[in-house]
């Protein structure tokens, strides 16, 4: 008999069915035993009246994988108003005692334990739905960009030289030659603007982060976007706004149970996201926090938090653009602001007080690249293969990258990015 | 004025418009010049009558990026029945002479040249559309699996031990510890069947292939699928059949111009893909080719070609399942065929005479894994983190992996997988 999922039971009252899943919890009473069976769709209650089967079930552990054949009956007091009676239970795989009780509403173990036993901990309903939410967000990302004429690409993760700087790269032995893991698909997505005009990539990026922080990982999922034939960075910001709107809408429509289970309120993306120039943001923060920030080239995390609160208070927005970061702190491919020397056409998007997205307009002319590198005292030799692209006609372009795990971290309001990563990689963690 | 794409021109006859793109070709006649401008949507013909502008255009190279403002007029002899007249041309970025003529119907350069100059070669219309086709196939892959309740996941690409064997892995310095690039997400997708029941991943996998062949890459895009609560491998084969159908349908609907430009016939996936047991396939091939293949544990490429021809001849099918490969040649996690000792519940899918997909049912009980490793004389210590998963209750499960580039290679009938890879990585190639 074809197995059905627990969610289908209410429509099958009176029928004999097969369900299968994990024993989520057993309740062994004097004359009857209840099994709560967990499957991909939720839970099913199984009533066991037969003494021999009660004894068998009493000897099973939670997380045993079982197949249950029985009859569906209505019972107002059971979950979803139905239960399975006159059941037979077949063990598909036994389980050792779990390191923690998955049936409790929350996992109250430490993060290292959660990560050491990821294969089990991820089965907890709250953790499961968080990752369904993450998949929904990525679906929304792709759907929005597909509809806007973007082409999805897959680029090399093993590269001959570090993408943006020599620091924080993983070195690799590539058939006897030195190579590196890509810190971002930056150069490739720019190159491919010369081919498809608009591209995106969803893929892993690698950072040999020497610090153990709550928001850095050695591997994370980057949602990368790049588009050509723009006037300036504002067109990039408009695409980012559309993309975020699509991502959040997809979470709402494709993972409503996750949103409900976590009791969270999804942010609304304003029709126009408030935007501050970097210089104005710095002045506001400095004055409000009583700090002299004159000449500071970047915002500190505390400043971003203050700006996030300001955007919510003044504009009712969870999002804030900070535009025009100083050239000094942006990568060499950043396009300067033609009207304001020293500042760039680069932006950050702050989401609930944390930097979520970095983006901007890039240089697109070959000689501008040579000048930018010369001004920084860097040799073009290290970037030869990349620079060659700009000899062959590249349109004005720009783009951005969203860190998926960081986005989920803020959406779910958890304190550590590892909580929203299936199997995190960091300074100390290489397994599971 | 907002830029429009070339495809929008026929609807704008009589209007003044802005288009932008690359100079694909110039035709300089005595009294008039024609510019063919290429953009993401196709081509636009621009007529230049003004002598001064003719001289300017004559000095430009192909691949110069231009913005053209002009008036759309109907002209039956022009491409798409329209052209742009009374034009002004603004150069957005100049271009050095291209290493080859992109305007020719086919790029007649050697593969190494094509790959060395990938940033330019990929702009060739035929190469462009092949990658749009690839993106469409991946879209179909995801859409089919999303509809069937699969969850998309992202798993670690840096791992503590080699996935399937010690050979062909890239070694890495991970914060002073040895680590490896993942050869496949095999262990993680199995682990996640214990969480979501059905999962898929689209991501890079890494093989340190020491041989330089037409069908191997050091990095390729693997479309990985794994599902739980199966009876045996036949349910996995059914999902694979659905997935391929979805992929090919998406290519037809989302990239029809690519299919037309390449003049290819998309394969039809039969309602039931013909299937042969490995032993029968071997006997047939041996008899037909006059070879004694008794006891052979695997099929050679020539055998696969013969079987592909047989499937087409006898069943009118481009696809053929070969089922029940000998245990000896399959990885240790392979589930044996309970009714036929020495053979497995593993299969390959042959597409037009080449192995495209490998899949099968996996072991799911902890002690079965210990026995399987012991029988091969392997120590369980190397797989500790993976094996632990099976202590906690894993359902019967199986899955498969499709190599995206290899699929495109056969679909487009090209001789080398590098032709359908944006920026290939192999024994000799680490750039661009």
Image: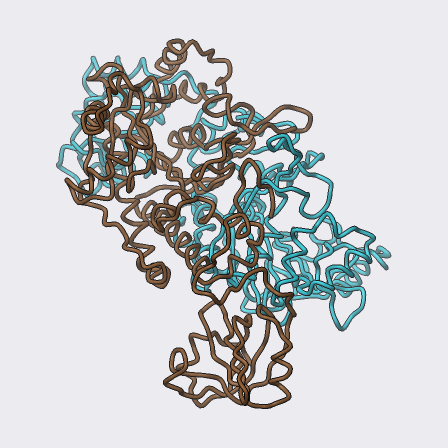
Chain colours: A brown, B cyan
Depth order, front residue of A331/B6: A331
Q: Position of residue B28 (x, y in %)?
A: 30, 19
> Residue B300, can we see it?
yes
Which of A27 and A230 lies nearest the eye of the viewer?
A27
Q: Quadrant of residue B334?
A: bottom right
Q: Is residue A32 above or below residue A247?
A: below
Q: In this picture, is B340 found above or below A246?
A: below
Residue sitting at x 56%, y 66%? B238
Question: In the displayed structure, does residue A146 sit left or right of residue A272?
Answer: right
What residue lies at 32% left-to-right and 30% top-to-bottom? A398
Position in image of residue B328 (x %, y %)? 79, 56
Describe residue A291's horizontal placement relative to residue B343 as left or right.
left
Residue at point 71%, 63% (across, down): B335
Task: State the quadrant of the N terminus of chain A.
Answer: bottom right
Direction from residue B31 to residue A87 in the image, left or right: right
| Residue B31 position in % (x across, y down) | 23, 18
Locate residue A170, reporting x and y percent.
Answer: 57, 29
In this rendering, the count of numbered labels is 0
Give whichever of B106, A25 is nearer the camera. Answer: A25
Residue B38 visible in rendering:
no
Above or below, A95 against A413 in this view is below
The answer to whether B413 appears left or right of A418 in the picture is right
Q: Tell me which corner region of the image, top left, top right, bottom left or bottom right, holds residue A244.
A: top left
């Amino acid at each position: 008999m074809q197995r059905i999922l627990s969610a289908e039971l209410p429509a099958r009252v009176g029928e004999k069915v097969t369900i299968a899943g994990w024993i989520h919890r057993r309740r062994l009473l004097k004359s009857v035993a209840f099994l709560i069976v967990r499957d991909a769709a939720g839970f099913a209650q199984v009533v066991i009246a037969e003494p021999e089967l009660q004894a068998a079930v009493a000897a099973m552990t939670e997380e045993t994988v079982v197949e249950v054949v029985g009859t569906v009956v209505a019972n107002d007091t059971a979950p979803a108003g139905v239960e399975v009676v006159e059941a037979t239970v077949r063990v598909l795989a036994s389980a050792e005692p779990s390191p923690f009780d998955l049936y409790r509403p929350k996992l109250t173990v430490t993060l290292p334990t959660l990560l050491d036993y990821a294969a089990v901990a991820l089965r907890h309903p709250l953790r499961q739905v968080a990752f369904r939410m993450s998949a929904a967000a990525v679906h929304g990302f792709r759907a929005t960009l597909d509809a806007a004429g973007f082409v999805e690409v897959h680029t090399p993760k093993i590269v001959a030289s570090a993408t943006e700087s020599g620091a924080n790269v993983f070195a690799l032995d590539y058939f006897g030659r030195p190579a590196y893991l890509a810190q971002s698909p930056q150069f490739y997505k720019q190159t491919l603007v010369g081919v498809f005009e608009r591209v995106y990539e969803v893929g892993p990026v690698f950072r040999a982060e020497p610090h153990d922080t709550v928001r850095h990982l050695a591997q994370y999922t980057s949602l990368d976007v790049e588009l050509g034939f723009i006037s300036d960075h504002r067109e990039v910001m408009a695409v980012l706004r559309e993309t975020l709107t699509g991502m959040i809408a997809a979470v709402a429509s494709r993972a409503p149970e996750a949103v409900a289970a976590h009791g969270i309120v999804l942010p609304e993306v304003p029709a126009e996201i408030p935007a501050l120039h970097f210089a104005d943001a710095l002045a506001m923060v400095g004055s409000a926090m009583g700090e002299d920030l004159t000449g500071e080239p970047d915002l500190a995390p505390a400043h971003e938090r203050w700006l996030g609160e300001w955007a919510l208070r003044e504009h009712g927005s969870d999002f804030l653009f900070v535009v025009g970061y100083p050239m000094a702190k942006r990568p060499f491919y950043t396009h300067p602001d033609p009207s304001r020397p020293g500042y760039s056409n680069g932006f950050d998007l702050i989401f609930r007080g944390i930097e979520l997205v970095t983006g901007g307009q890039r240089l697109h002319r070959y000689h501008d690249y040579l000048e930018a590198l010369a001004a920084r005292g860097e040799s073009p030799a290290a970037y030869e293969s990349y620079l060659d692209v700009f000899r062959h006609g590249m349109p004005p372009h720009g783009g951005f990258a969203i860190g998926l795990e960081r986005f989920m971290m803020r959406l779910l309001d958890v304190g550590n990015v590892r909580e929203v990563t299936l199997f995190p990689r960091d300074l100390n963690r290489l397994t599971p």
